[in-house]
Amino acid sequence: MKFFVDTAEIDEIKDLASLNMIDGVTTNPSLIAKSGRDFKEVIAEICKVTDGPVSAETVALDAETMIKEGRELAKIADNIAVKVPLTWDGLRACKVLTDEGRMVNVTLCFSANQALLAAKAGATFISPFIGRLDDLNLDGLELIQDIRTIYDNYGFETQILAASIRNANHISDCAKIGADVVTAPAKVLQAMVKHALTDKGLEAFLEDWKKTGQTIL
């Protein structure tokens, strides 16, 4: 499974990249606004930190302007994945940009039908939002499973990019049911290392070592 980090904070990206823990980055207008920096400047810097896909989102609602924005974003770096919404205009933009050889991430997916349309339009990635479905007492993981089944049935190459990841269990659950990629905040990726028994075992080892009165250095 590929890990993308969902952030526009350069230090977070550099830290994870130094451990080879990420395969790409996703951003959105909210994350860019939170950074307080120039949009294109941030995206360009991120693209220098990772060779993997960097999702940069269009903000237009009509297909014609989305396509123009997508082409402009793609000029920033070769690893840009143009992010468009799962609307009819977004699908039109996806088809054009994909035909031009660009990576496209179709975002805000909340149903298997939407994911099927995105695959038909040639999307590189489809981004189902797990956490937002869970917030409505719907099963976000079931959506991932449904998309996996449909894509496998027909050999679609669109990668399932599980988004709106809220906790470490979401990540392992997505891995079990075959999501190609998860994108999560840095703190969620880092939380994967935590386990109470690891902490307890380490504490016991260190206490026993202290009793020996020895040092390694």
Image (cartoon, rainbow, N blue to C red):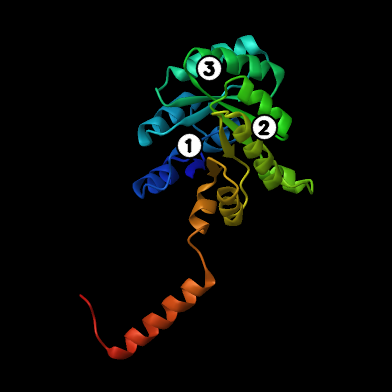
Q: Dot 1 lies on which element? A: strand
**The furthest residue to the left:** 217
**The furthest residue to the top:** 64
- Residue 25, numbered label: 1
- Whichever of labels 1 and 3 marks the residue nearer the N terminus, that label is 1
Tell me the residue that label 2 is attached to: 108
Tell me the residue that label 3 is attached to: 98
Q: Residue 38, position in %: x, y?
A: 48, 27
Quick check: 62 above or below 86? above
Instruction: Identify the residue shown where x is 70% and y is 45%.
Output: 142
Q: Dot 3 lies on which element? A: helix
Quick check: 56 above or below 188? above
Near-viewer residue (34 or 112): 112
Separation of disc 3 and disc 2 at Cα? 18 Å
**Amino acid beneath label 1:** Val
Q: Dot 2 lies on which element? A: strand
Quick check: 85 above or below 215? above
- Whichever of labels 1 and 2 marks the residue nearer the N terminus, that label is 1
* Label 3 vs label 2, nearer the camera: 3
* Label 1 vs label 3, nearer the camera: 3
Q: Is 182 placed left or right of 210 in the picture?
A: right
Separation of disc 1 and disc 2 at Cα? 16 Å
Q: Residue 93, position in %: x, y?
A: 61, 15
